[in-house]
Every structure is written in C-alpha cells, then in structure tokens.
Amino acid sequence: MTDPENKKLILYRLTEVEKKVTNIDKKLEGVYGLKTEILSLVSKLDIYHRDSLKARELIQKDLDNHQERIRQLEKNQSKIVWAIIISILMAVIEFTLRGGLKQ
C-alpha cells in the first residue's frame, strides 16, 4: 500500500473508532440517567416504606384502643343485664311477699 492509502485507511479506522466511542458515551449517559432514576425511586420507596410503617403502627394502636373499648362495653353490658335480672327477681319476690294477686 502506498502512503496516501495508508493515511485514508488510518483516517477511516479512526473515524470508526470515534463513532464507536461516541456511541459508547451515549450509552453510558443513558446508564447514568437510569442510575439516577433508580436512586430516586429507591429513595421514594424508602420514604413510602417508613410512612407505611408509621401508618401501620397508628392503625394497630387504634385497633388496640377499639378492642379495649369493646371489652369495657361488654363488661358494662353484662353488669346492666345482671342489674335488670336482679331487679325483676326482687320485684317478683316483693310481689309474692305482698300476697300476689289477691282476689
């Protein structure tokens, strides 16, 4: 090969290498952009996870409070039922002691 042909071949190969390097640079920029996007999503997921844990704790606390209130209401309900039963029995006993239905 002659010297001008060698120069053309070298220039052609250099141009091809530059194209490949440019293409690789573009791909790396895309990867960097994806990395930034992924890190942003990870950060948002972390915030969401912390918020959901707080919400779960609050819901559990609220549920525990409601369960305790239900237990108290059940205790009060049973006391009221017993008070009604005792009142009815006392009324029947009093009615019987006073002579019941006298004719």
Image (cartoon, rainbow, N blue to C red):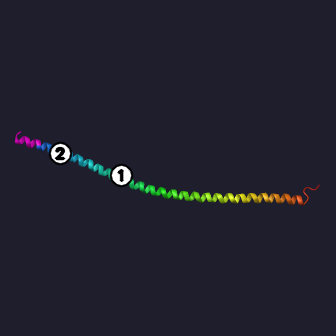
Is 99 colored magenta in this rendering?
A: no
Q: Position of residue 40 (x, y in %)?
A: 37, 54
In the picture, measured across the screen, residue 13 lies left or right of residue 43, that is left
> Going 42% across and 56% down the picture, which residue do you hit?
46
Is 6 colored magenta in this rendering?
A: yes
**Residue 17 got which mark?**
2
Locate the C terminus and report the quarter of the image it occupies: bottom right
**Type of the residue with mark 1:** Ile
Secondary element at tag 2: helix
- Magenta residues, start to end: 1-9
Q: Position of residue 14 (x, y in %)?
A: 14, 45
Q: Position of residue 6 (x, y in %)?
A: 8, 42
Quadrant assignment, res 8 = top left
> Going 58% across and 58% down the picture, which residue do you hit?
64
Locate the N terminus and report the quarter of the image it occupies: top left
**Type of the residue with mark 2:** Val
Secondary element at tag 1: helix
* Label 1 crowd bin: few (<14), some (14–19), many (20+), radius 10 Å: few
In the picture, measured across the screen, residue 18 lies left or right of residue 57, that is left
